[in-house]
Image (tube, grey):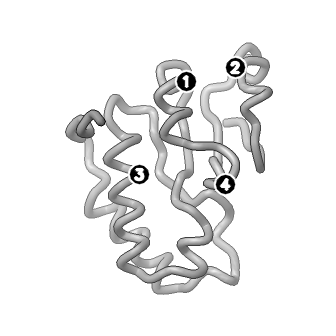
Amino acid sequence: IYHSCGNFLPFVEDVLAHGCNGMEPFQANAVDIVAFKREYGHRVCVKGGVNIDTLVMRTPDDVEAEVRDRITWLAPGGGYIIASSHSIYGDCKPANVVRMAEAIRKHGRYPTPEPVKE
């Protein structure tokens, strides 16, 4: 799995050409993970997507909503590992980290329904 902070889009083809099987962590302000999965999800597994800022600054209900959203849009077809968009570090609210784990267990079962097309 290729790890890169920030915008790694300019290097995607080079990384994939070297046999990469997965990419992470998809920082929300740098790379749109949903758009990335649509374009490259047939070639590489994506990991991440739960915005670290949500774990630091938002409520447990916000965390669950974000986890559910990520699973809805990224899990169909496989090739998605849900995780935070960064390491879990000291500024994360413990209640939010717990809620993330609970929400993953609650909503993260395969097979998943296809998301509604816009």
> Could you tell which of marks 1 and 4 lies nearer the N-terminus?
4
- Disc 3 is placed on an element classified as helix
State the image coordinates of residue 75 (x, y, percent, origin top left). 36, 40
Q: Which quarter shows the N terminus?
A: top right
| 92 left or right, relative to 2 | left
How many neighbours does mark 2 have within 10 angstroms: few (below 14), some (14-19), or many (20 or more)? some
Task: Out of 117 and 112, give the one closest to the viewer.
Answer: 117
Give the Cα separation between the discs numbered 1 and 3: 16 Å
**Residue 29 circle label:** 4
Mark 2–mark 1 CB contact (< 8 Å): yes
Q: Amino acid at mark 1?
A: Tyr
Q: Nearer the viewer, mark 3 or mark 4?
A: 4
Q: Amino acid at mark 2?
A: Leu
Mark found first going from the N terminus, 3 or 4: 4
Q: CA distance from mark 2 to mark 3?
A: 23 Å
State the separation of the CA atoms marked 1 and 4. 19 Å
- Label 4, secondary structure: give it: loop
Residue 70 numbered tag: 3
Residue at the image point whose x is 48% and y is 40% from the top: 34
Q: Nearer the viewer, mark 4 or mark 2?
A: 4
Circle number at residue 40: 1
